[in-house]
Amino acid sequence: MRNNLSNIKKCRYYLNRNECIGIPTETVYGLAANAYSHQAVSKIFKLKKRTKKNPLIVHYVNLKDLNRDCYLNNYFFKLYKKFCPGPITFILELKKNSKIAKNVTNNKNTLGVRFPRHSTTQKLLRSLSYPLAAPSANVSKKISPVSKEDVKDEFGRQIKYILEGGRSKIGIESTIISLLGKPQILRLGGIEVKQINKVLGIKLKYNKNSKKVVSPGQEKIHYSPEIPIRLNVKMSKKGEAFILIKKRKLYCKSFFYLSKNNNLKESAKNLYKTLRLIKKLNFKKIAVEKIPNKEFGQVIYDRLVRASNFK
Ligand code: TXA
Ligand code: MG
């Protein structure tokens, strides 16, 4: 490949040859491959060490392309109009004649789809003749990446190229909503459930114990820095990294603030970065203060509970 090619052309070079690349999105960085190519998609599973049973979400840049692959309904159009492009993933019914590779969906007839807001990735998608399957660009169960460096941290030289896109603005994954029948929230994320309810005029609640609709990736252990985590802690113990939502006047090296002024959205954005930093600094234990059970506090808590299931 010529070195003077533009970034987008470099991406296309690798993607067209069925390779995986790192791409920026407003939520977290993704590990992307041609969603129409079985061979390319199988590389994602291998790199991530992800079970084949856990389907991938597919990224689009326009409705026309999505309409070729999935059946769209009224719930979808309402939410699309309000939130897309943006941090929301829809589970839809896959069309029989869709070109989506069978290993994207684990042979099922449903597909997770998303319209990312990041302009560089939108530009890339516009230049391709296929959509991109892209899970978060981390090894399964580990911390999601929010910068190019984080993706390098996860995969090193195993991936050929990472598209630079700066730090992810939201820093936490998309909200997932199933639109197969009655809408159901499968994962908390970048769009608050309250906002979705407002648009749909219904009252959805996230039920993490729901056994009816399963999002295979919502495992108990996930997003983990592989360090024991204690939650709802008033004061940390010696040797623990102490994560706080709000900046306070505590002078100690092992305090990590998620936000300057108690802002939950900012805290969510800084969560993965902070966990990765704590791991790099070689702390062996983490304590976290009580997280408010509202707005983005719920997403932060959800991620920390899964991260803390590490033994
Ligand atoms: O913000 C995001 O959504 C990021 C960026 C890169 O777009 N992607 C992401 O992908 O978080 P991943 O694979 O790490 O998480 C997607 C989740 C998984 O838990 C998977 O099980 C679930 O979506 N999922 C995918 N397809 C599904 C389907 N057809 N039915 C139910 N759940 C599905
Ligand atoms: Mg993930």
Image (cartoon, helix red, strand yellow):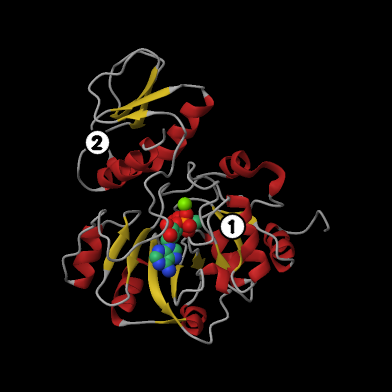
Q: What residue type is labelled 1?
A: Phe
Residue at 30% x, 26% y is 247
User: With respect to residue 158, does 199 lie above or below?
Assistant: below
Cα distance in 3D space between marks 1 and 2: 33 Å
Mark 1 Cα shell of 10 Å, populated few (<14), some (14-19), many (≥20): many
Label 1, on which residue? 45
Which of disc 2 and disc 1 is earlier in sequence?
1
Residue 267 image position (x, y, % from top left): 34, 38
In the image, 288 versus 26, the foreground residue is 288
Callout in the foreground (1, 2): 1
**Please, is residue 86 above or below residue 22 in the view?**
below
Residue 9 occupies quadrant: bottom right
- Image quarter (top left, top right, bottom left or bottom right) of the N terminus: bottom right
Mark 2 near ligand 2 (CB under 8 Å)?
Answer: no
Given residues 187 and 114, the one toward you in this image is 187
Q: Quadrant of the C terminus?
A: top left
Name the secondary structure under disc 2.
Answer: loop
Residue 266 in view of the camera = no
- Residue 36 locus on image (x, y percent): 61, 74
Q: Nearer the viewer, residue 155 or 269?
A: 155
Left or right: residue 280 versus residue 194 is right
Instruction: Indicate left or right for 255 with 37 as reference.
Output: left
Relative to 222, does residue 227 appear above or below in the rendering?
above
